[in-house]
Amino acid sequence: MKIKLEDFIEGDKKAFDWVYATYAPSMFGVCMRYTNCRDDAQEILQESFIKVYENRKKFDHQKDLAPWIKTIVIHRAVNFLKSQKKLQLHDTDHFFEQVIEIREEENSKEQVQKQLLNILQNMPDGYRTIFNLYVLDNLTHQEIADYLSISVGTSKSQLAKAKSYIQNKLKNKGA
Amino acid sequence: MKEFDDIDQLFQEEFSSFDALPDSKVKEKIDEKLFGKSKKRFLFWWIFSGLFFTACAISIYTPEHSTQFVVRFRNWNYLYI
């Protein structure tokens, strides 16, 4: 693995192919969490791996590659949402009226994942982004506030609304 | 679905290992942007073109294998070139 990482840093295409094959599925999962559309997720993944290759010399090969790639993917995802003007923070609760279909009998791990992803993808983009950053990617409210140029209070309130939204969806389905 | 009280924990558990497969065209586009068009594709067209023009030349300039059309074409060539 060490040889391959060094080859990757040198710009070897086969090593880059190996990096893509190894990390693309998990990173595409991250992209899917941040967007509500597969095409957008693929665009983010594509831009991210181009950035990964272009910035390969900045990577410290003593460290693990996955968190470094994940940081790039999250950065690209947030920038993508900003560029599409999708990252709007909502104060209203009218989204709670929408109903997402979750079937109770489907409770295998894959099905639960699929249902939760469905809830996540149907959330307003602002809720989803802050929920992802705080809960799943472990950023603090201060980091999120700095990152998205919002106040710490806004970050906290959006997270609370995101959780209420999810709770509401799970209750609707008799969870 | 089972009872979920802690939303954070639920999502962290479910998405700790969440993989999804992107379309193969994503990798093709990345390769095209970073490394240009595939050399294999160029090689295929070079070989194909080479074989095609060789076959054409043989069929035109070998009388015993020529069709009537090819004979006319060859005569026309002789007249004007």
Image (cartoon, grey):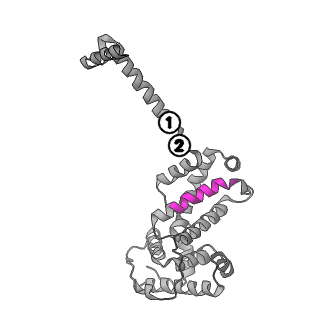
Rendered view: A132 above or below A11: below
Mark 2 residue crowding within 10 angstroms, few (<14) / some (14–19) / many (20+) = few
Question: Measuring 44% from the left and 83% from the top, which residue is drawn there?
Answer: A169
Q: Which mark is residue A136?
A: none
The image quadrant where one finds the C terminus of chain A is bottom left
Whether residue A42 is situated above or below residue A135 in the rendered picture = above
Q: Residue furthest left?
A: B68
Q: Look at the numbered disc 2 and give the secondary structure of its residue.
A: loop
The x, y position of residue B32, in whole percent, is 54, 47
> Mark 1 or mark 2: which comes first in sequence?
2
**Is residue A94 or residue A62 the one in the foreground?**
A94
Examine the image and state in which quarter residue B56 appears.
Answer: top left
A95 sits to left or right of A149: left
Residue A136's image quarter? bottom right
Give the farthest residue toward the front.
B80
Evaluate whether residue A20 shows in this view.
yes
- First to last magenta residue range: A43-56
Say which amino acid is labelled 1.
Phe
Q: Residue at x 50, y 83 (%)?
A: B4
Residue A135 figure quarter: bottom right
For the stretch drawn in magenta, what is the main secondary structure? helix
Q: Is residue A46 magenta?
A: yes
Numbered-mark total: 2
For marks 1 and 2, give the CA distance: 8 Å
Contact flag, marks 1 and 2 (Cβ < 8 Å): yes
- Reply above or below: A20 against B11: above
Residue that carries the numbered disc 1 in the rendered image: B42
Query: Looking at the picture, how far across and down is residue A157, in whole percent?
Result: 58, 87
Question: For residue B37, which numbered disc appears in the image?
Answer: 2
Viewer can see residue B18? no
Q: Residue at 37% across / 75% down in the picture?
A: A105
Give the amino acid at mark 2.
Lys
